[in-house]
Amino acid sequence: MQKNKTLLTAFIILDTIIIALVVVYFLAKPAPEHPYYADRPNVMVIAHQGGNHLWPDNTIFAFQNAADLGVDVLEMDLHITSDEVLVIIHDETVDRTTDGSGEVEQMTLAEIKALDAAYRWTRDEGTTYPHRGQGISVPTLEEVFQAFPGQRMTIEIKKTERSMAAPFCAMIRKYNMQERVLVASFHDERLAEFRAECPEVATSSARQETTIFVLLTKAWLGGLFSPEFHSLQVPKESSGITVMTPGFVQAAHARNLKVEPWTINDPEQMKLYIEWGVDGMITDRPDLLLEILGRKK
């Protein structure tokens, strides 16, 4: 008798789970369309920090060279100075890339502008530093918008103590870049802040959102997911889990999500991902990807 009751309870729980999954599946919505992705090539060439292996990263110099190559997207990183100016630099400090030292968030714009942003950039492991002393500085976001008004951009919100959502959104609107910018971040709370402040701008998935979608696809349950973002910018693998597979790309596309893996510098990997149908690749070598795509000038 007790065994029958246990089986009945198990069947009820299982039925409830199945019904719930069916309901969620039919209520789930794909990612909304966004004009950021309108009129784009099948595979977008996304120049990581402007092409980190080709030129001093996150500089106007790099972005101009990448644009001249014919890349589709300039990728960059966003920080804020102590006097509330948005600047383009990857690290929390200036130490790795410039001739200075200190935390970006604790320095004024004037202090940061006095630094040589190309000081430590080298292509031969330190034998030469070809762009030192050429006046290459850390750019502001406003300078980038002014220099490249027609260029698509992926801008990553980096880790800061202060929120950048309000001034970032205001700058995007000031230069009418709502359809040219996609915002990324590893930090879920910062991306949530930005979406609340600037809902008209496209975003990619943050860390937790990516993890949830990856795990759902591993269980063939990607159809239950209703994304609030437009793209998945993901590595080949993370924490021992393979992220990039043909099935992952198909599951993402079924939710109207674009797949833009990073950071892809190997030509054979590029060719493989093109075969899988990715929508773009974030690369330090945009020249190689353009050549593979038959688009090199």
Image: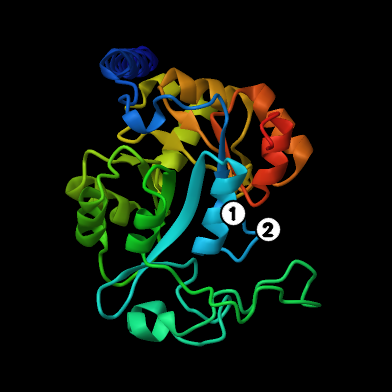
Q: CA distance from mark 2 to mark 1?
A: 9 Å
Q: Secondary structure at mark 2?
A: loop
Residue at the spot of label 1 = 65
Residue 227 versus residue 6: which sits nearer the camera?
227
Q: Quadrant of residue 14?
A: top left
The amino acid beneath tag 1 is: Asn
Q: In percent of the image, x 76 and y 39: which residue is there?
A: 267
Q: Is residue 220 visible?
A: no
Q: Which image quadrant: the N terminus?
A: top left
Q: How many marks?
A: 2
In the image, residue 236 above or below residue 194 = above
Residue 119: where, in percent of width, then height?
62, 79
Q: Can you tell which mark lies on residue 13?
A: none
Provide the residue designation for mark 2: 54
Q: Secondary structure at mark 1?
A: helix
Question: Image check: 148 left or right of 260?
Answer: left
Tell me which label, 2 or 1, sits earlier in the chain. Answer: 2
Corner quadrant of residue 170 = bottom left
Few, some or many residues within 10 Å of mark 1 (<14, 14–19, 20+): some
Question: Does the rendering let one see residue 200?
Answer: yes
Circles 2 and 1, Cβ within 8 Å, touching? The answer is: yes
The residue positioned 71% from the left and 73% from the top of the image is: 130
Q: Residue at x 66, y 72 (%)?
A: 121
Q: Quadrant of the C terminus?
A: top right
Amino acid type at image mark 2: Leu
